[in-house]
Each structure stands twice: as C-alpha cells, then as structure tokens.
C-alpha cells in the first residue's frame, strides 16, 4: 500500500522535481535531483522496429527507489513514450528487488544504482523521434516524486550503439528474475478457507534456508509470505492468511504476481487463484 506516501507529498508541489533534456546522442545527459539522478539509453531499432532502451536510476547513498509494487509506501517507476512513426512502449522490466526497511515500514526496491530495461516498438525501417516522460520516487526520510522528460531526435547520433552501451544493457538484463521454468514454478494457487494456499516447484537452498516469497497485486500492495514447508513430494508449500490483504481489497481483486527467491535464484511469474477442491 502507498499509505505513507502522503509523508512525502506535503505539499506535493513543493517537492515535485522536474527537468527537461534537449535532443542529444544516446545516452542522454543525467537529470539530477537531491535524491539521485536518472538518464535514458536508446539503442538503434532492429529490423522489425523493436527498440531496446533502458532507464538508469542512481539513488544517492541512503536513498532508495522502487519496484513495480513498492510495499508500504513509495512510487513505482512510470515511463510514458510518445513520438513519431508509431513508437510505443511495450514493456518495462524490473530487476530483482530487495526488501528495504524504512521509516517504520518496509518497501520492495533498490538502494543501489539500478537499470530498468525498456522495450519499445516503432514502424519497421524508421528512426522515430521520442518524447519520454519518467516519473518515479526517491525516498530517504520522505518520498520525493522525481520527474524527468527526455527528447530523442530522429537521427543516427541519437541512436548510437557503442560497446559500453551494449554492456550496460547486457548487465541490466542479467539482473532480471528468471521466467517460470519446469524446475522453478507455481504449481497451484488457491483460496482455501481463510487463506491462500500456494505450492511451488523450486530449488532448495543449502542448509534448508527458507525461500522468500513476495506476492504483488496490481491494486498496489505487496505481501511477504510467511515461512512455508517442504512437502514429501518435493514442493514448497506456503499459506498466506487472507487477513494479510489490506482493506478494502479482496483476494479476487486485481492481478497477482509472485517473486520467489531461493538458492541464489529469483523467479517472477503471474498467477491466478482458483477455488480449493472440496473435500469428500
């Protein structure tokens, strides 16, 4: 939930930081603020019009920025792309976040520099102009909305590709969680009485260290699942009480996403809730 966000918005207009960058070669100039700095990287379009890009965020020491669903407070990154030649943002990818205890609550986010890979599309064979609006939160004792507007000109300089930029993109993609696979996946998720029962196939950590499971809901809240148990069939089973869902929401509301960490690996996947089978 974002219930503590009001602490950083009093008054909002006094704290809202915005900046605009002119057309330039990629990467863009940094846009800086008290809590950190942000820039945009754009690689040349592929033959089908796919454009790989990235948003680099570097919080100042002691500051954090946020995951797709922050937790108790905060502002998740938002990117809006407009421009020529049918350009559109298709996807923002989120590196594996950490649980961060801050201001009496907890958030899911990043307290070190982080790069969010972006996937854009445009008409094949074009170099589109880009207007990219970024809105995110940087938090220390309070959460400060940070806004930056970038313009990318439709010329080869703006879409330059260098070994350094390619390395930055490759490094960013290496920080993303795995997709669901046969050995790391949700096998069932159901509402069972007063709880959500989830079973996973997943790697077991050395020393039987407990996995970390984070349930994120598109309504804007996250739940850290309590410790589960390994069953005889090798699956990890966890029960999340429905009371952990903040009012006024219900388990059936919104879309669910699960982030699981175990044995040095992290996996993120969407999942849906079914009704538990009736016992005879």
Image (tube, helix red, strand yellow):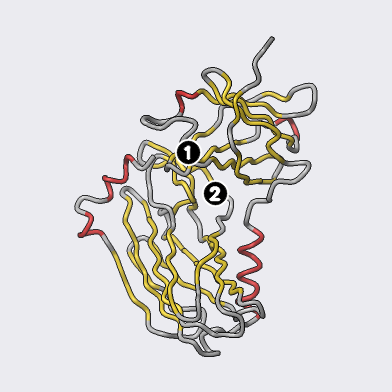
Query: Looking at the image, is mark 2 or mark 1 nearer the viewer?
Result: 1
Give residue 222's mark: 1
Q: Nearer the viewer, residue 132 or 124?
A: 124
Q: Of label 2 and label 1, which has the lower sequence position?
A: 2
> Vertical placement of 274 versus 118: above or below?
above
Say which residue label 2 marks. Answer: 97
Image x and y of residue 253, in percent: 46, 36
Q: Residue at x 49, y 34 (%)?
A: 223
Element under label 1? Answer: strand
Label 2: how many Cα within 10 Å (few below 14, some 14–19, many 20+): many
**Distance of mark 2 from mark 1, alpha carbons?**
13 Å
Q: Residue at x 59, y 41 (%)?
A: 258
Are the residues flagged by discs 2 and 1 in contact, CB closer than 8 Å? Answer: no
Percent x, y for residue 23?
42, 85
Q: Which mark is residue 51?
A: none
| Relative image position of residue 256 (x, y in whole percent) | 54, 40
- Look at 71% across and 40% down and name the residue there: 185
The residue carrying pointer 1 sits among few (fewer than 14), some (14 to 19) or many (20 or more) residues within 10 Å by Cα, namely many
Determine the residue positioned at 78% across, 41% down.
183
């Amino acid at each position: 939930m974002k219930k503590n966000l009001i602490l950083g918005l009093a008054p909002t207009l006094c704290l809202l930081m915005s900046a605009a960058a002119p057309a330039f070669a990629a990467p863009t100039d940094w846009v800086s603020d008290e809590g950190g700095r942000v820039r945009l990287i754009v690689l040349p379009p592929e033959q089908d019009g796919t454009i790989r890009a990235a948003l680099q965020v570097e919080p100042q020491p002691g500051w954090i920025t946020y995951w797709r669903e922050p937790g108790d407070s905060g502002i998740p990154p938002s990117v809006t792309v407009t421009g020529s030649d049918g350009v559109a943002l298709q996807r923002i990818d989120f590196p594996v976040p950490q649980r961060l205890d801050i201001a009496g609550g907890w958030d899911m986010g990043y307290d070190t520099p982080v790069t969010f890979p972006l996937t854009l599309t445009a008409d094949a064979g074009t170099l589109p102009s880009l207007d990219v609006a970024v809105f995110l939160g940087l938090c220390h004792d309070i959460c400060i909305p940070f806004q930056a507007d970038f313009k990318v000109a439709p010329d080869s300089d703006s879409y330059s590709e260098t070994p350094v930029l390619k390395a930055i993109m490759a490094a960013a993609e290496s920080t993303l969680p795995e997709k669901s696979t046969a050995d790391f996946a949700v096998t069932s998720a159901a509402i069972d009485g007063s709880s959500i029962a989830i079973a996973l196939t997943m790697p077991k950590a050395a020393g039987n260290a407990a996995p970390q499971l984070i349930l994120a809901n598109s309504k804007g809240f996250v739940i850290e699942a309590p410790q589960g148990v390994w069953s005889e069939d090798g699956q990890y089973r966890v029960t999340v009480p429905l009371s952990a869902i903040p009012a006024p929401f219900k388990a059936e509301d919104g879309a669910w996403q699960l982030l699981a960490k175990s044995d040095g690996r992290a996996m993120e996947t969407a999942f849906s809730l079914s009704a538990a089978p009736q016992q005879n």
